[in-house]
Image (spheres, grey):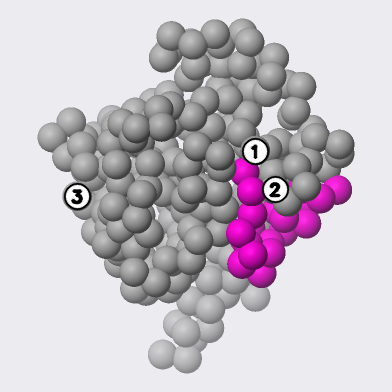
Amino acid sequence: MLQTQPILTVLQHDRDVPLDRFATWLDGVETRVVRLFDGEAVPTLSEAGAGLLVLGGAQNAYDDERAPWLPATRELLAAAVRADLPVLAICLGHQLLAAALGGRVEVAAPPGREVGIVPVTWRPDAASDPVLGPVVRAAQTAGADAPANGVLQPSMHGDAVVELPPGGQWLASSAMYPFQAMRVGSALGVQFHPEASPELLARWAAGHGDDGAALEAEARAHDEHVSVAGRALAQAFASEVRAAAERQAVSTLQA
């Protein structure tokens, strides 16, 4: 039995893309935020704790000159998957995960920016995924807003994964972009933003010249469904991190 909460390392690329609602939804873990945009170093695998959460940002997945920490981030993501460490990668994190493992990301993809509250449709394997499975079930009971075979989630991106890494499992799609969620071993990547509140989505929109007030109103109108699904995802991932910490503790005792 663990005596303290396990450490979940969070990589934050951008001051304006924080944990937001995940800060209170990741039950039973201690989040350690690494502010890469402020010059903090990408941790090594041994420093990552019991799990890794990689947030979004304004950079692209190959933007090494603008964000010189990205090569080390991609290396850490690949190492985490090899080590079977639980990983959740969101938006830019999802794209970095794909790039790190041999997939391909298209910068400024031709369909254009996907902005607002987006219907995401599950693929057949989503229901049995250890993190998305609880989201599938929660979304089904989250009110009339729920799509028949999917979920509503905040979105704000123009780059996109266009080829999955070798062995990647395709878990969700949207009308604009097919690869909304994927699993590669211990890592789950999602293109949408389950952590984003209506207020945060509005700030992002305004920063891109969109109508932030209109987007905030849209997000608030659907927030009962959006927040139920987002909370379920955060809690399911936190459960994976706690289980990994238990395994690490047993392994240490047996060593």
Amino acid carrying mark 2 in the image? Gly
Q: CA distance from mark 1 to mark 2?
A: 7 Å
Q: Residue at x 38, y 41 (%)?
A: 160
In the image, residue 241 above or below residue 59: below
Residue 180 percent location from the top left of the image: 51, 47
- Check the picture and name the quadrant holding the N terminus: bottom right
Q: Is residue 45 visible?
A: no
**Does the residue at mark 1 contact the one at mark 2 (Cβ under 8 Å)?**
yes
Q: Which mark sits nearer the N-terminus, 1 or 2?
A: 1
Q: CA distance from mark 1 to mark 3?
A: 32 Å
* Residue 150 image label: 2
Range of the magenta residues? 120-141
Q: CA distance from mark 2 to mark 3?
A: 34 Å
**Can you identify the residue that label 1 sits on?**
119
Q: Residue at x 30, y 62 (%)?
A: 101
Element type at marker 2?
strand
In front: 46, or 55?
Answer: 55
* Residue 71 image label: 3
Q: Residue at x 64, y 65 (%)?
A: 124
Q: Which mark sits nearer the N-terminus, 1 or 3?
A: 3
Left or right: where 153 falls relative to 89: right
Q: Residue at x 43, y 27 (%)?
A: 113
Disc number lying in front (2 or 3): 2
Disc number lying in front (1 or 3): 1
